[in-house]
Amino acid sequence: MYDVIVIGGGNAALCAAISAAEEGASVLVLESSPKLWRGGNSQHTRNMRVAHAAPTRCLTECYSVEEFYEDLLKVTKGETNEELAKIAIGQSEEMYHWLEERGMFFQKSISGTLSLSRTNAFFYGGGKTLVNCEFQKAKDLGITILYNHEVEWLNIQNERVESLVVNTPTGKKEFKAKAIIAASGGFESNREWLREAWGEHAKNFLIRGTRFNEGKVLKSMLNQNVQAVGKPEQGHAVAVDGRAPLYDGGIVTRLDCVPFGIVVNKNGKRFYNEGEDFWPKRYAIWGRLVASQPDQVGNVIIDSKSFNLFMPSVFEPCKAETLEELAELLDIPKDEFVETIHSYNAHVEEGTFNPDTLDNCCTKGLEVNKTHWARKIDTPPFYGYTLRPGITFTYLGVKIDKDARVYMDNGNPTKNLFATGEIVAGNILGQGYLAGTGMTIGAVFGRIAGKGAAHV
Amino acid sequence: MSKILSLKENMQVARRAMEICNACRYCESLCPVFPEITRFRTFSDHDLNYFANLCHNCKGCFHGCQYAPPHEFDLNIPKTLAEIRVESYSQYAYPKAFGKLFFKNGTLVSIIIAISLALVFIAGSLLNNADSFFSAYSGIGSFYHVIPIKLMSGISMLVCAYVAVAFFMGFKQFWLESGEKMSDLANVALWKSALSDMLSLRHLGGGDEGHGCTHMDDRYSQTRKWFHHATFYGFAMTIISTTIAAVYHYGFGWHAPYDMASLPVIFGTIGGIMIVIGTIGLSVIKVKMDPVPVAQQFLGMEYSFIALLFLVSFSGLALLFFREGIYMPLLLCIHLGFVLAFFLVLPYSKFVHALYRFGALLKYAKYKEH
């Protein structure tokens, strides 16, 4: 029998496993995916938010614990557990060094990022390289890793996990350990559950991350009176290219062109101010906006003036010499579409266009005005990109305390169950999103959970 | 094994891959290729050839790729670029008709070795006498009892001149096609930067981050860099050894064989041992490495070149060891046969990676500040 079983194979799970092994525990990692798909959503991440008092090799200037906490309060609108948030933030710098000391590499950020080098430490080669290095470290520490092992049920009795029921390549098996750490992610790859939580329109959502976050571990816990945290309908969704793959589209499915054009729904109507603020501050709301449109689809329309202003997209845009042709390519009613563009163009107030500031190019007098970067769409060729909501992760999770210990509905702590990663992110991110914070939470509480589990 | 694609298909695969990389950019600090592609929005065949030669084949971008197979995007950058790279060697080859030699390279190298050995033995037996193969010689000029000095130096000068022309023409084509002017090469700063990159193998060592490369599996290590260094600097030392020997011979009239404590022997011996160690190390890595991010169809070119380098060095060391006894004539012919083969295939062997990689680093030096 192992001392500790870690459920999951992403950054949080591996931090927990490494930490438990370093405390002297024998550790087993159960990863539901095959080896080539390992790493959960961590393989699609790129950085971790780190508070730091002074510049480090890969972080510029200073980002105080207080400032990090304020940023968190802003995005969550106060929906956070202050104690846990302050632990995650307070230990983030220590965690950065902890990872580095164990062979996980960080890099200086160079380009194409949202100027995050002050607040976020970038993984050398991205999240998949981070996860690879973590698996190597785990192997070096003698941790056993079993792929294709999907935990389906936690057998919880008297507030103690007695055993795990696991689907393995050779059938259903039971695993036992002195302590269990759940780091198995959210439920965003489970379409049925998504539909239950988010409504019928969830059928048209794309999943930006792993296909293996089925939420079985989460559901098993919630079905046995483990205390939940966060709302099922809370999650992080952005607008992504409509042609992205159903799963694992990751970073390249993003579209950064919204502020430079207009967005119309399938009926050819605009529905929100595209130029409200800089894209990095707005992209997260567009998932919701598009989700609320008919058929959960939007179309960004730009003309040739704007084509080189944003990061290149991985999918070819629809391109046409006339607006009518573009409407046809995008399958939007022609007359409404042309009317929308003409009326938009007619209300554009000429200004000095500047993509680097909140400039004075705007429309006046429309039902939905565009407040910055509004320029007439009049220079062919015209381009159209389809937008769909893309889910990054869900927030529904389990309640933990400062020791990463999971709680029961009756308020009692469980005796041997810990959790970290996306499955506990809702403790701190009640709503909204702050880039790189999920990785910070997973790593910090992973280390804490590993330590705690090793000494149960 | 996956299907072997035509050049046109490879270019298409690479173009698509670069577009995905350009939208992702997670690999930006792995090597110069990824920062370079951000200068582009579309990619011509010449651009792709440039990236292919700039790529050091460290494979970090494969193991760290969220879009590598089994992902439906099916990105395998090291393999795709390796295929384009060899195609580019073939396009730049001089004379053009010899470009095809890159595609059956293992066979080519084997045949050239066989012919070269035969020629040297024929020369040894015709121009002196067959008995000389079984005699012990010692003292000054002993090698020339087997192969006359005039023949030895005459052939090597001819072959070297040919190699120099082939290299120059190939490099020129690479440079012009990549969109640069010959006059750019007057910029000393480019040479300084590219030489520093080459001599330190900075990008095989993981750039300034310095984690090495992922040559066996997904683990970073400097092993491959050190074996390459051993091979490269070992080779450089044997060239230095030969050059000093030529100066001794023609400048001072001091004839081979030289003392164990002489500069040609010291450089040659250390260089030879380094090459033996380096080529064995590199071969072991190739045998044991993860086969997925590798252009399998061109491994013959890699193995045959490494093997030939090993044979040249090992036979050289054997000759040094046995030069006083009756085995010297045989070993001399074997060594000279391998050396002749090495230089004959040089412009159509894996060796040209040095030429075009250096060219790519020169070009990279020109743009990296932007």
Image (cartoon, coloured by chain):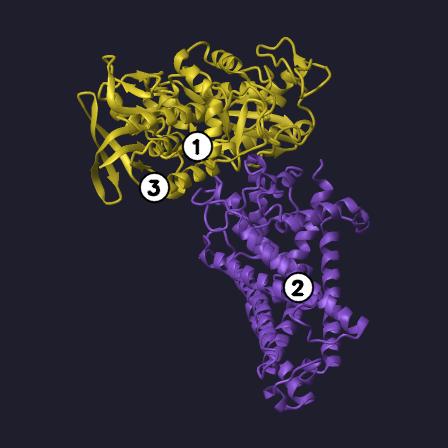
Task: Give B6 or B91, whichever is nearer the viewer.
Answer: B91
- Do the residues bearing badges 1 and 2 touch, measured as CB atoms within 8 Å? no
Amino acid type of the residue tagged 1 in the rendering: Ser
Q: Is residue B162 visible?
A: no
Q: Residue B281: horizontal and vertical position, in percent?
A: 51, 58
Q: Provide the chain ID for the residue under circle 1.
A: A
Q: Tell me whether marks 1 and 2 sit on the same chain.
A: no
Which corner quadrant of the image does residue A282 belong to?
Answer: top right
Q: Provide the chain ID for the residue under circle 2.
A: B
Amino acid type of the residue tagged 3 in the rendering: Gly
Mark 2 neighbour class, 10 Å CA radius: few under 14, some 14 to 19, many 20 or more: many
Q: Residue A233: horizontal and vertical position, in percent?
A: 37, 18
Q: Residue B205: horizontal and vertical position, in percent?
A: 58, 46
Label 2 secondary element: helix
Q: Is residue B14 above or below residue B259?
A: above
Q: Residue B220: horizontal and vertical position, in percent?
A: 50, 44
Task: Give A260 or B327, whichever is nearer the viewer.
Answer: B327
Q: Which mark is residue A42?
A: 1
Which chain gets the yellow colouring? A
Q: Provide the chain ID for the residue under circle 3.
A: A
Label 3 secondary element: loop
Residue reaching furthest to the left: A158
Q: Marks 1 and 2, Cα distance to the nearest angstrom?
A: 51 Å
Q: Is residue B167 left or right of residue A153?
A: right
- Rendered hue of chain B is purple
Check disc 2 and report the residue beneath it: B267
Check disc 3 and report the residue beneath it: A142
